Image: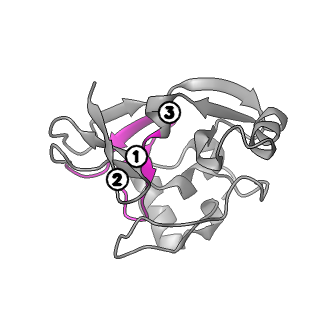
Amino acid sequence: MKTHKVSSTINSIGRTASRNFISGEIVHQMNGTIITENEAEDLFVRREVDGDDFLNYDDTHFLLLDEDSRQFNHSCSPNVGLNDDLQLFALTDIKKGEEIAYDYSTTVGIDYDEWFMDTECNCQSTNCRKIIGCISTLSEETIISYKTKGAIRKYISDQL
């Protein structure tokens, strides 16, 4: 395992690097079960899952993340991004023991249901936006930076 489960100041549980990673290196493969948007909403409404237990898979499906994949927190100043193969990869060099976090807003397309996102942010970064929303809540500069690095999945990038 390339990461360790730990206590986190961002959200009670997080994951840290078990070794050093260099920029571009794969840190984690996101895994889970692909479900429809209706199934995801039903689970959420029944309070069987939280909004961050899902990852948009495409315009009509979600990946209900497995336990390890759910433990990566959000940051407005992330050190990993999510690529088209659903892999978290290092955006910068990451030191052993550093908490690994990605920008959840890069994973939610423009046409999203409000039940899913618009969550208060607790990442504590100096660039904190105070809210986790969809891709359109990011500044144009931030979107360009993420696109250049390959940290916005194609189906979301195509919506911009």
**What residue is disc 2 on?**
8
**What residue is disc 1 on?**
13
Q: Position of residue 4 (x, y in %)?
A: 28, 35
Locate residue 53: give its quadrant.
Answer: top right
In magenta, the rendered stretch is 71-93
Locate residue 77: give its quadrant.
Answer: bottom left
Majority secondary structure in the magenta region? loop
Q: Please state which of residues 7 and 160 is positioned toward the viewer in this rendering.
A: 7
Q: Residue at x 35, y 40 (%)?
A: 89
Helix, strand or loop at label 2? It is loop
N-term-proximal mark, 1 vs 3? 1
Q: Callout 2: 10 Å neighbours few (<14), some, many (20+)? A: some
Question: Is residue 30 at all visible to an observer of this figure?
Answer: no
> Please, what is the three-letter code of the amino acid marked with disc 2?
Ser
Q: Position of residue 66 (x, y in %)?
A: 53, 28
> Please, what is the three-letter code of the amino acid marked with disc 1?
Ile
Q: Residue at x 73, y 28 (%)?
A: 35
Helix, strand or loop at label 3? It is loop
Locate residue 36: give its quadrant.
Answer: top right
Q: Position of residue 51 (x, y in %)?
A: 65, 48
Q: Are marks 2 and 3 in contact (CB under 8 Å)?
A: no
**What residue is disc 3 on?**
86
| Of labels 1 and 3, the one closer to you | 1
- In the picture provided, is 147 more to the left or to the right than 92? right
Q: Residue at x 19, y 42 (%)?
A: 22
> Please, what is the three-letter code of the amino acid marked with disc 3?
Leu
| Of labels 2 and 3, the one closer to you | 2
Q: Callout 3: 10 Å neighbours few (<14), some, many (20+)? A: some
